[in-house]
Image (cartoon, rainbow, N blue to C red):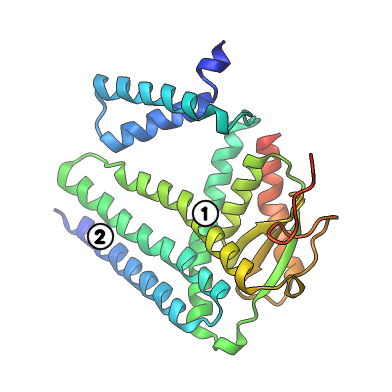
Amino acid sequence: MLTRLIPHPLLSVTLLLVWLGLVNTLTLGSVILGAVIGLIVPMLTAAYWPERPKIGKPLRVVEYVLIVLWDIVVANFQVAAILLFRRTQNIRSKWIPVPLDLTSAEAITVLAGTITMTPGTVSTMLSADGTSILVHCLHTDDPDEVRDTIKSRYERRLKEIFQ
Amino acid sequence: MNFVAELLIAVSLVISGIFGFVGSFGLVKLTSTVQRLHAPTKATTLGVGGILVASMIFFYAKNGHLSVHELLITLFLFLTAPVTASFIAKTYMARNVSKRELPETNGKYGWSIYDDCPDT
């Protein structure tokens, strides 16, 4: 019964927080309206998202977010340097297939988003059975190193968070 | 508004200007569509981020309390940028990249735009 009413508690809390952020003031009225939105939206969308993702270690989420934010800042400088100081014919782009150990759809989505936002890589698609992900690298001399970085830096942490 | 706040705002605006320019320059300089995807998804994040930081400092110095709208813009940007990039990449590959140009997958099945998903 409770799972029917609140299919995604985390989503409800997130929606409430986002609503309070949009209103930008903390009043009783906005909290109530935010709570109503947080209850109704997950109920209406529950059919499209039947499974509830398990978050094992919430503190690891904070660590992961900080690491990714830092990497995004570094990535900006690296990509800017490649764009500004390399001749077009010297930019060696490569396709890199990365095997996945993650199985849950939410974890793979987060990993794909992270890859797109960080150093010189864009995730383009999954294999048909979801066991590897195709990454396009803007410039690299060592594709194996890129693959190992993705696996050890992001995938390992996501595995700890989602399992 | 005091000098320190003005200085911080000016610095973040200049940084965002530089990165916004580099991102746009990358669009012109790079040659293939997949390479061009890299410029707006990365160099521009710091470009927009700089403006948002400047805006937060400005309103904090002016009104005395923190505005969270900028954090929400960052959140929405981080949610939408990878999805857009993925859609553009897939559309481009479906039309212009053949199966043979790509490396093999590590499993039994091929890449999802060329191969059907196995029955579950």
The answer to whether marks 2 and 1 sit on the same chain is yes
Q: Residues within 10 Å of mark 1 (few under 14, many from 20)?
A: some
Q: Earlier in the sequence, mark 2 or mark 1?
A: 2
Q: Residues within 10 Å of mark 2 (few under 14, many from 20)?
A: many
- Residue A159's spot in the image, x, y percent? 71, 41
Which residue has dot 1 on it? B83
- In this rendering, would B16 be left or right of A132? left
Do the residues under discs 2 and 1 have CB atoms within 8 angstroms? no
Which residue has dot 2 on it? B9
The picture quadrant where one finds residue A47 is top right
- Residue A86's spot in the image, x, y percent? 54, 85
The Cα atoms of the two marked residues, 2 and 1, are separated by: 31 Å
The picture quadrant where one finds residue B115 is bottom right
Vertical order, A144 against A48 (above or below): below
Residue drawn at the location 52% of the way across and 69% of the way down = B37
Vertical order, A21 against A65 (above or below): above
The picture quadrant where one finds residue A107 is top right
What's the residue type where badge 1 is placed?
Answer: Val
Residue drawn at the location 81% of the way across and 55% of the way down = B109
